[in-house]
């Protein structure tokens, strides 16, 4: 959307973004706080005019014929039933379908306290990229680089095309990549000798599980591989603590998977879902997005330089090994049509609940984090202030020019109910008559 079409929305977004960004340059604050302000301000600026359309419009491809995104489940009150009626939820088809990570809808509930339902989801298109960027920068900083370099290296992780594609379809839980970066940051802190790092790691993993089950699986598998590769006592201690803290949550999730009839059997998930959303080497695509657009090319070059400089360091070699392993799993159940992926199939055969994993591409999020680790370790400290402008220039060309970026989607008034296609069939599963954009606040739509 050109500035001439929406001058006020553009002006508001640019002014607000610049003002918050300048707050990140203020001295006297902790560097991590300054970095958060800078990331937030730049996100508002670079996603303009999104901030000017938080209320009451919808952006992106919602609603569509085949996908309603997370809004439908939010309006259904699924997260409330999961929290307040956990036993009854074991026989609730909607809760069984989504699983324990429906708790990400409480984030929407928080924003819905002072925004409309549309606004509560729209604002997550600013908050999630910001947090993903910032948590990635925290990870790079903990590895050993300076803040300007860390912010540049993590830019493509939080502001990647893959994140905006998920936001564009209102699957906001998949855009919460910050949870995976936060877990990695806590784990590295543990490895660096933080006395309470193992407890922070356990809490971070539990939080990740409640927000996005798939990211928690990536974190668990990555940590298990790290235990085998590095054999550091700190990693083992964090793993044991995480297992003890997260065991009740994992048990409940497995109970949900086995409590009732799933919408499809294991073979259907394998061939119709898991085989589609993958890292496709043949087409050079990640979840059906061009790989060169969805992975920050500046980060790739920096990681190659970092690997060349520091490949003799034990932790760098471990990060490279994890990158290769997670990339391998992101290929999914088949290496090519008709050619099984033996590693994936083997892990799937003995890991409880893995049959339900329908999006192997999430493992590549862990691969991108390993690129950040390798790049940060190799580049070290140097205050490369020129690196961030280069990242932005490449991002504008590769990401903003793609139709999955919501800034180039059509903003529209929310006049359709999220269940409009269900109501046509006479299946009113969500509060009848509710329309996004209604002035009346939703109170309890689960009744």
Image (cartoon, grey):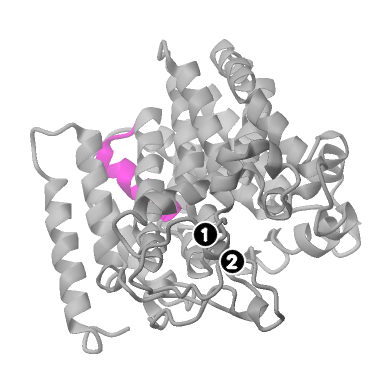
Magenta span covers which residues?
A: 144-158
Residue 340 is tagged as: none
Tell me the residue at 24%/65% (across/down): 45
Tell me the residue at 22%/47% (across/down): 37
Q: Is residue 158 left or right of residue 25?
A: right
Helix, strand or loop at label 2? It is loop
Identify the residue at the far left of this view. Answer: 27
Helix, strand or loop at label 1? It is loop
Q: Earlier in the sequence, mark 1 or mark 2?
A: 2
Residue pointed to by mark 2? 430
Residue contact between numbered discs 1 and 2, judged by CB atoms under 8 Å:
yes
Identify the residue at the far bottom of this view. Answer: 5
Tell me the residue at 55%/67% (across/down): 431
Q: Is residue 365 visible?
A: no
Residue 445 is tagged as: 1
Q: Quadrant of the C terminus?
A: bottom right
Q: How many marks?
A: 2
Q: Is residue 22 above or below residue 35?
A: below
Q: Is residue 119 above or below residue 360?
A: below
Depth check, front residue: 67 or 31: 67
Rendering quarter of residue 238:
top right
- Image position, residue 207 (x, y; %): 51, 35
Depth check, front residue: 84 or 212: 84
Q: Is residue 34 above or below residue 69?
A: above
Q: Is residue 283 visible?
A: yes
Rendering quarter of residue 52:
bottom left
Magenta-highlighted stretch: main secondary structure?
Answer: helix
Q: CA distance from mark 1 to mark 2?
A: 7 Å
- Image position, residue 390 (x, y; %): 30, 60
Q: Is residue 379 above or below residue 193?
A: below
Tell me the residue at 51%/47% (across/down): 104
């Amino acid at each position: 959307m050109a500035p001439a079409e929406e001058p006020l929305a553009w002006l508001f977004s640019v002014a607000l973004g610049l003002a918050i960004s300048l707050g990140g340059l203020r001295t006297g604050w902790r560097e991590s706080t300054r970095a958060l302000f800078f990331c937030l301000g730049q996100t508002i600026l670079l996603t303009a005019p999104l901030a000017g359309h938080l209320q009451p419009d919808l952006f992106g491809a919602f609603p569509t014929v085949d996908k309603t995104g997370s809004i439908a489940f939010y309006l259904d009150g699924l997260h409330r039933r999961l929290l307040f009626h956990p036993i009854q939820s074991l026989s609730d088809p909607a809760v069984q379908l989504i699983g324990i990570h429906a708790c990400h809808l409480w984030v929407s509930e928080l924003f819905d306290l002072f925004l409309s339902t549309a606004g509560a989801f729209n604002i997550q298109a600013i908050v999630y990229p910001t947090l993903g960027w910032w948590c990635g920068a925290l990870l790079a900083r903990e590895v050993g680089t300076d803040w300007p370099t860390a912010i540049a290296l993590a830019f493509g992780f939080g502001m990647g095309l893959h994140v905006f594609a998920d936001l564009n379809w209102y699957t906001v839980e998949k855009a919460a990549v910050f949870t995976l970066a936060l877990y990695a940051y806590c784990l590295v802190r543990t490895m660096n000798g933080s006395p309470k790092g193992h407890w922070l790691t356990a809490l971070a993993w539990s939080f990740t599980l409640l927000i996005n089950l798939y990211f928690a699986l990536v974190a668990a598998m990555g940590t298990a591989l790290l235990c085998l590769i590095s054999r550091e006592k700190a990693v083992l201690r964090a793993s044991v603590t995480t297992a003890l803290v997260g065991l009740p949550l994992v048990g409940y999730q497995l109970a949900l998977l086995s409590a009732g009839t799933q919408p499809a059997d294991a073979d259907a998930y394998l061939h119709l879902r898991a085989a589609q959303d993958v890292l496709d080497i043949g087409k050079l695509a990640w979840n059906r997005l061009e790989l060169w657009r969805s992975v920050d090319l500046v980060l790739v070059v920096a990681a190659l330089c970092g690997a060349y400089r520091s490949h003799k360091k034990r932790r760098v070699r471990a990060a490279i090994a994890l990158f290769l392993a997670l990339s391998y799993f992101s290929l999914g159940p088949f290496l090519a049509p008709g050619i099984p992926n033996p590693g994936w199939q083997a892990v799937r055969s003995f890991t409880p609940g893995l049959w339900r994993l329908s999006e192997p591409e999430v493992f590549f999020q862990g691969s991108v984090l390993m690129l950040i680790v390798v790049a940060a370790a190799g580049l070290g400290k140097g205050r490369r202030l020129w690196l961030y402008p280069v990242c932005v220039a490449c991002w504008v060309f590769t990401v903003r020019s793609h139709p999955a970026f919501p800034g180039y989607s059509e903003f529209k008034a929310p006049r359709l109910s999220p269940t409009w296609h269900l109501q046509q069939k006479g299946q009113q599963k969500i509060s009848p008559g509710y329309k996004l954009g209604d002035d009346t606040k939703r109170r309890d739509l689960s009744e």
